[in-house]
Amino acid sequence: MRVVLLSLVAISAAVPVAFGQDAPTGLGVTDVEFTIEALALSRSDTSTPFLQNFDLPGSPIQSTSDLAKFGTAAGIRLGLSGSIDGPWGFEASSFFAGFSRSGAVVSPGENLDSAYSVGVVPGNMFFGTSTSAYYASFIEQSLLGSGELNATYDLGGAKLLFGPRAIYYSSNLSSYFSDDISSFNGGGGGGNERVSIDSINRLFGAQIGIEGMYQASDTFSFGGRATAGLYGNLASLNRSYSDDNAGNSPIGASASSAVSATGLAESFELSPKVALALAPKLDLEVGGTILLLNGIDEASNHFAGIGTPGGAGTLGSDAPGFHNGVNFAGVSVGLRGHF
């Protein structure tokens, strides 16, 4: 943190010269503002289906995206900003939100077949001695969080902003298969199989953008903010598998693996808003948020890899990939206090 603050002070002293202005002479903080916002965000479905389809005899093929959609997630965002000297200022903010979806398919005749992602031979990849199953369920969850610290420069009517930003995005996919009714009811049989996949993306980098509000009247203003960022993605992938009936599985009773990788990621964010003055030092703000993340790994990308084991007791080689894009959109309602 000391390095960040020293860097911001150095930038504050150097950049005004490029704009033809005097360097700041002090670090007195004025025009302090604090914001708190409630978020309602939705996210796009995964771009790589973890199961290509379920095939129920006599029924249309069902895509897993039809089992359930990601619900709207509630979140919170906090912000603090102020002016330091002349045209210079600072702002810091953070937010988080969580997402979840689940689904299940039951085949009373124990004839639930499955076709897995492209590149894997269709069929029931887990039940080595069975061609179909009775029950399959899935839970997919993801968590999004962000923190940023920016220097701002007043351009007259708008502000240039730039600084470090960190983004955390994790996803977990858990599945449960029962080979037959007896297994599902805990009475033995072909067995129950469980898979858990955790993918964690830790993005560290910097962003640049512009923001501003136009004062339409004494009580109403509108504007927003747009930013773009570039990051290093420190990703990790953890996978585990277990089977109640080890002899029924090409993998064995259980197996697990953990691996890390690094890649590049980008962010693009657009946040329009309107503000209504409730009191001399208090505003009500209503806005929208669109956040695009590229170069992200997701747990759902690695489900098919569980079904191509490297041998008994192993899950085969797999590592985080950075080709996914995840999109978030929603609305915000909050208060801004001026001090």
Image: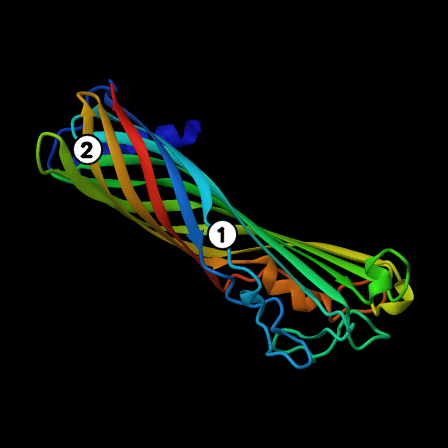
x and y, in percent, of residue 176 in the image:
73, 59
The disc labelled 2 sits on which kind of residue? Answer: Leu
Crowd class of label 1 (few under 14; some 14 to 19; many from 20; radius 10 Å)? some
The disc labelled 1 sits on which kind of residue? Answer: Gly
Q: Secondary structure at mark 1?
A: loop
Judge left or right: residue 61 versus residue 21.
right
Q: Earlier in the sequence, mark 1 or mark 2?
A: 1
Residue drawn 55% across the image and 60% down it? 68
x and y, in percent, of residue 197 in the image:
67, 55
Q: Secondary structure at mark 2?
A: strand
Between the C-alphas of marks 1 and 2, the distance is: 30 Å
Q: Nearer the viewer, residue 85 or 172?
A: 172
Identify the residue under disc 1: 71
Q: Residue furthest left?
A: 217
Colour pattern: rainbow
Q: Nearer the viewer, residue 44 or 86?
A: 44
Identify the residue under disc 2: 276
Residue drawn 79% across the image and 77% down it? 131
41 w.r.t. 128: above or below? above
